Structures are given as structure tokens and as C-alpha cells.
């Protein structure tokens, strides 16, 4: 499904007595009224950056956010993207970003929630602060941002929310218990929200990649050691996001065969666990 915006401007805080701090100063150019707008989180690297470049190549206006202004500038180079550095785990982070994005671009046709972090190791050794941080970045921040962005989409009668999940959220991965929990929560949220938004013109897409060849594993401090599934490229995931938005798809697996483990788990959980114990 492609979205052609109307160029209307939305009030991001209708009839609200709560006025947060002024939004971050945007850099970039306001979009022409005939260009659809995508807000991409986690756009400073990895899947988010690759997705931003794919949408820019498709002629979309971009609003890019992440915590690293320098890397965001690199992603935006050669485009008319509006750059809004932000920390979505801050209490007012999602609200402030949504306001700034709507003010800068006039509308948001697609939200691509690509921000995320990992943590690997036995759950018994995981600090409580790390549990909170993974849940804040990988689940809570996205839910709050979606809540801030949705009213304008519903009012316009069009739009799409793209949530980047993980195969870990479908099957659970040893030594990644909290990350798996966060991504499972994202999958359940996508399904529930999709049902709530039926008839509004706003769709929800869950993109489920396996391991992706990015700096994700370096940043979590533990390399990817499994022989299967083999890491795919961020470019491939970005292409899947692009196709899903154009086609209005609800669920996308990258690669497609990753639907199999979840099906086996659902139909034959004992067999699935035996296979997991053997092959990891």
C-alpha cells in the first residue's frame, strides 16, 4: 500500500492541559504536500538506517530519529530528511518526538519502529537495571510513541505502523530471555492493535527478521555464534519493510522460512523443545 499525503497539518496535543518542554530543533526540509512521510526510529544505524535509505530512494520524505546526531546526519546525507535526535526512553521522549515530527513534516504516513538493543547471557546474571533498559528500549518506548502518533493517522483515515520484531519473540531464545519477552510483547501488541484499528484506514505490520548482520551484536557485547539461522543483511530487511508498506501486508518474515519454527512450536511443542535442546 502506498500512501499519498494530503498535506494537512495536525495538532499533536488537542485540548491538552499538559504542555511538555519544547521539542528538539529539527534539521532538514519540510516535505512537499504530494510526498508521503515516514518517521523512522533507530535510524542512526542497522535496520533503521537501511530502511530510511530505501524509503528515500522510493521518493518519500523522511523524519529520522535516534540518539546519535552524527550517525543520523550520515543516514540523512543526500536526502531532504528532517533529523530529530531523541532518546525515546526519557519520560517525555515519545510525546516530544511526535510533536516535533508532526510540526516539521505536517503529517506521518508511516511509522517504522526500528530502534532496539540486545542483551545476551543467563537470566540469573542479568542486573535489574539491564532488564528495565531492554524492556524500555525494545518495547515500552515503541508503545508510547505509537500512542502519540496514532491519533493523527486515525484522524486522517490512513497510515501504517511498522513494528520491527524478532524471531526470538516467536520462539524464545536461550540466554536472551528478556529480549525474547520484549519482542513477544511487540508481536502481541501488533496483533491486538491491528484488530482495534480495523476500519480506520490505519494498518499494522509486524516485521520478523532472524539475526541481522549489523552492529547489534557488537553493542550487546556478545557475538552471534549460532550456525543457523545465518545472519541476513539490513538491506534485505529494509526491502521487506518497503514491500510490506506498499502491499499493505500484516506479517513479514525475513527470510520467509522463519515461519516454520513458530509453527512447529505451536503444533508440536514437545518436538520443538527436543529440537531446540539438540540444535540450540
Image (cartoon, rainbow, N blue to C red):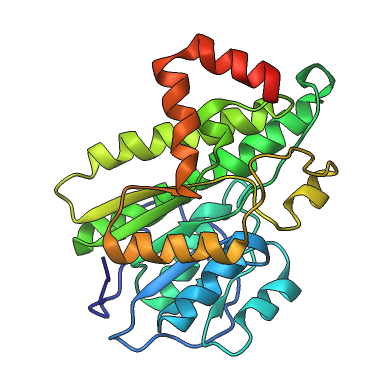
Position of residue 229 in the picture relative to residue 247 (left or right): right
Residue at position x 52%, y 9% from top?
Answer: 270
Res. 66 image quadrant: bottom right
132 or 96, nearer to the observer = 132
Q: Position of residue 235 (x, y in %)?
A: 57, 67
Res. 23 image quadrant: bottom right
The quadrant in which the N terminus is found is bottom left
Q: Position of residue 165 (x, y in %)?
A: 51, 43
| Residue 147 in the image: above or below residue 167 | below
Residue at position x 57%, y 78% from top?
Answer: 26
Q: Position of residue 240 (x, y in %)?
A: 45, 60
Q: Position of residue 222 (x, y in %)?
A: 84, 41
| Residue 191 in the image: above or below residue 218 | above
| Residue 228 in the image: above or below residue 201 | above
| Residue 222 in the image: above or below residue 31 | above
Residue at position x 41%, y 81% from top?
Answer: 58
Position of residue 74 in the picture relative to residue 3 (left or right): right
139 or 274, nearer to the observer = 274
The quadrant in which the C terminus is found is top right
Res. 105 image quadrant: bottom left
Residue 14 visible to an observer of this rendering: no
Residue 187 visible to an observer of this rendering: yes
Amino acid at each position: 500500500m502506498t500512501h499519498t499525503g494530503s498535506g494537512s497539518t495536525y495538532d499533536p496535543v488537542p485540548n491538552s492541559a499538559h504542555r511538555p518542554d519544547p521539542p528538539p530543533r529539527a534539521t532538514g526540509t519540510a516535505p512537499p504536500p504530494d510526498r508521503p512521510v515516514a518517521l523512522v526510529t533507530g535510524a542512526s544505524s542497522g535496520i533503521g538506517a537501511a530502511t530510511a535509505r530505501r524509503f528515500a530512494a522510493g521518493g518519500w520524505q523522511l523524519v529520522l530519529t535516534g540518539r546519535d546526531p552524527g550517525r543520523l546526519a550520515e543516514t540523512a546525507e543526500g536526502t531532504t530528511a528532517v533529523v530529530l535526535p531523541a532518546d525515546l526512553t526519557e519520560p517525555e521522549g515519545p510525546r516530544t518526538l511526535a510533536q516535533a515530527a508532526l510540526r516539521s513534516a505536517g503529517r506521518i504516513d508511516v511509522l517504522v519502529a526500528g530502534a532496539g538493543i540486545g542483551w545476551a547471557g543467563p537470566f540469573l546474571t542479568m542486573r535489574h537495571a539491564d532488564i528495565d533498559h531492554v524492556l524500555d528500549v525494545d518495547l515500552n518506548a515503541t508503545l508510547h510513541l505509537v500512542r502519540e502518533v496514532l491519533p493523527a493517522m486515525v484522524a486522517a483515515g490512513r497510515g501504517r505502523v511498522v513494528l520491527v520484531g524478532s524471531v526470538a519473540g516467536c520462539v524464545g531464545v536461550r540466554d536472551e530471555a528478556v529480549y525474547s519477552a520484549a519482542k513477544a510483547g511487540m508481536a502481541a501488541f501488533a496483533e491486538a492493535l491491528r484488530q482495534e484499528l480495523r476500519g480506520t484506514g490505519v494498518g499494522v505490520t509486524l516485521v520478523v527478521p532472524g539475526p541481522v548482520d549489523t552492529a547489534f551484536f557488537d553493542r550487546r557485547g556478545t557475538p552471534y555464534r549460532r550456525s543457523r539461522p545465518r545472519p541476513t543483511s539490513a538491506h534485505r530487511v529494509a526491502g521487506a519493510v518497503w514491500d510490506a508498506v506498499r502491499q499493505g501486508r500484516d506479517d513479514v518474515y525475513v527470510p520467509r522460512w522463519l515461519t516454520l519454527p513458530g509453527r512447529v512450536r505451536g503444533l508440536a511443542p514437545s518436538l520443538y523443545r527436543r529440537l531446540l535442546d539438540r540444535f540450540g
